[in-house]
Image (tube, grey):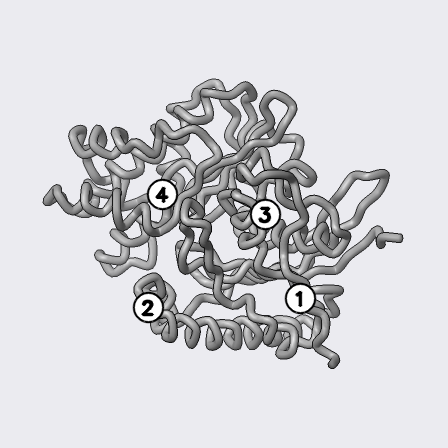
Amino acid sequence: MHKSMYSILGLMSGTSLDGLDLAFVQFTQDDSVWRYRIQVAETISYSPDWVKELSEGINLTESALASLNERYTILLANLALAFIDKYQLKPDAICSHGHTIKHQPHLGYTLQIGNLPKLAALLQFPIVCDFRVGDVALGGQGAPLVPIGDELLFSNYDFCLNLGGFANVSTNTHAQRIAFDICPVNTVLNYFAQKLGLEYDAGGAVAATGIVNEQLLADLNALSFYETAHPKSLGVEFVNREIMPILNAYSLAIPDVLRTFVEHISEQISSHIKRFEGKSVLITGGGAYHEFLISRMQEALPEHELTVPDDLTIAFKEALIFGFLGVLRLRNEVNVLASVTGARHDHSSGMIYNDYLS
């Protein structure tokens, strides 16, 4: 007999490296309908040293990466314990995404660090984690995994668009959920904002002062990935291999780079959304605060209703949904959709560690 209510701590670290998102969420099921309430949530920023280590992790040797994995697992545990202690929480389970270092599903490989069994011993709570590996083993992209949450928690929107390190969208078409990554967002925007000494381009204020370079925009839009059929997903490898060489080939002022890349994001998102039916779009992720980008998207999608929700949902939607993926995993119910990832079949993915008392 499954419970009808779960108190879950969801942990999410995204590719934009802005910190660890922690969301303590109450999930309830009533007449097969799932609802959620975020009770308390925080983002804890990474130290500059951790930002450097995580951003350079893709280049590490196997032994150095194993060390990073061990140390990052301890960091996650310490941050989660401090959060639990601060708010006097009693989670039924802690559900953690970890931090993606490598994502190469075409090679049958994806690595999220911080998912070692040691996490359960350190936290002394049941742990559900490492959600992507099982999907890649079944021939899937291992991403995006959030759409099952979109389907069950946010079904009143035609599109759920997340603007994080990358833009991804999920929607229903032909009676099945599909989702895919569209293009880089904060991985690129933050990189260039940081060259100006800014953590990020708040509201898009810098980008708004720049001028679109039409040739650069055309070069970016011509990348073959954008014409690839879904399922498809992106990692930092794509940015390093495809995006940065194009941007670096132009000697542009940073505001012009930001302005042009905002236009690129807007054009790619709008062109992909227009391929499907539906008009209502829920926008979450850090990019939802980029007011200039949102205004460019609204201009490109004049017939669509773009909704930027409350701050908690914007900032912590991924953390709450990975918490939800953990609930479904604990119930041994489908939490990854083959229609989204391209896996051989729907499945319940994630490792469960609950032997911390032994």
Marks 2 and 4: CB-CB under 8 Å?
no
Residue 155 rendering spot, x and y as whole percentages:
66, 33
Query: Upstream in the sequence, badge 1 or badge 3?
Result: 1
Q: Report the residue that reaches farthest toward the bottom.
A: 358
Residue 125 rendering spot, x and y as whole percentages:
70, 72
Query: Upstream in the sequence, badge 1 or badge 4?
Result: 1
Tell me the distance, in whole angstroms, between the alpha carbons under discs 2 and 1: 27 Å
Query: Upstream in the sequence, badge 2 or badge 3?
Result: 2
Tell me the distance, in whole angstroms, between the alpha carbons under discs 3 and 4: 21 Å
Callout 3 secondary element: helix
In terms of depth relative to the viewer, which is nearer, 88 or 152?
152
Tell me the distance, in whole angstroms, between the alpha carbons under discs 1 and 3: 23 Å
Three-letter code, disc 1: Ile
Residue at left 30%, top 45%? 205
Q: Find disc 3 in the rendering and name its residue.
A: 313
Q: Find disc 2 in the rendering and name its residue.
A: 60
Marks 2 and 1: CB-CB under 8 Å?
no
Q: Find disc 1 in the rendering and name its residue.
A: 127
Q: Quadrant of residue 95?
A: bottom right
Query: Upstream in the sequence, badge 2 or badge 1?
Result: 2
Query: Upstream in the sequence, badge 2 or badge 4?
Result: 2
Tell me the distance, in whole angstroms, between the alpha carbons under discs 1 and 4: 30 Å
The correct choice, above or below, for 247 with respect to 351 in the image is above
Query: Upstream in the sequence, badge 3 or badge 4?
Result: 4
